[in-house]
Image: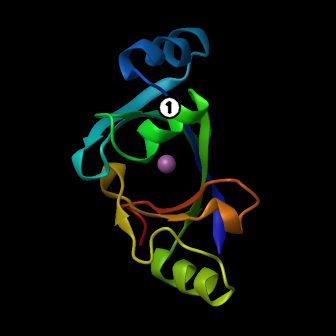
Amino acid sequence: MFEAIDHTGVAVADLDASIPFYRDVLKLKIVHRETLAEQGVEAALFDIGVAHVELIAPLGPDGGVARFLEQRGPGLHHLAYRVDDIDAALATLSAAGVRLIDEQPRNGIRGSRVAFLHPSSSGGVLTEIVQPANHP
Ligand code: CO
């Protein structure tokens, strides 16, 4: 069901202030930047092999990422697995009794479809599944 680690999500307060470390010190290639207004976040994506590091910053004081920063500060936020069929993956996970944050996929960056599993079902790890836009 899972094909690869797609990305690790890192919560940051300020995208512009956080990009230089990844781009200039770690020398990761920044490949995308997008505001997802409906999710209340702005994201920057870096390539690392076949996977990515995704920086996410809240657009305002509300929403999950803003709450995360307030409670825990910046740092590791979620782990995302790549799937070829997100609808099938959600059905399989739901049938296995996994608590889902998203019963239906939502829009992710670069036209992807994404869904989050509740960390109470995954050992405290906020887990995302991603079906890339270019996936058949
Ligand atoms: Co993500």
The x and y percentages for residue 61 are: 33, 34
Whole-percent x and y of residue 113?
38, 64
Quadrant for residue 13, please give it: top left
Is 126 drawn above or below residue 101 in the view shown?
above
Residue at (72, 55) in percent of width and height: 124
**Which residue is painted at 63% across and 90% down in the image?**
95
Query: What residue lies at 36% left-to-right and 61% top-to-bottom?
Result: 133
Element at label 1: helix
Question: For the N terminus, which image quadrant?
Answer: bottom right
Q: Can you say whether 30 is above or below 20 in the image? A: below
The answer to which quarter of the image holds residue 134 is: bottom left
- Residue reaching furthest to the right: 123
The residue closer to the viewer here, 135 or 19, is 19
What percent of the width, then of the height, locates residue 27? 57, 16
Residue 50 in sight here: no
| Count of number-bearing discs | 1
Which residue is painted at 65% across and 60% down in the image?
Answer: 119
Could you tell whether 113 is left or right of 92 in the image?
A: left
Q: Nearer the viewer, residue 98 or 133?
A: 98
Is 100 left, or right, of 17 in this rendering?
right
Disc 1 designates what residue? 70
Whether residue 78 is situated above or below residue 42 in the rendered picture: below
Q: Amino acid at mark 1?
A: Glu
Split into 4 quadrants, where in the image is the C terminus?
Answer: bottom left
In the displayed structure, 132 sits above or below 10; it is: below
Dot 1 beta carbon under 8 Å from ligand 1: no
Q: Position of residue 76 (x, y in %)?
A: 63, 36
Q: Is residue 20 visible?
A: yes
Q: Choose between 63 and 47: the one closer to the eye.
A: 63
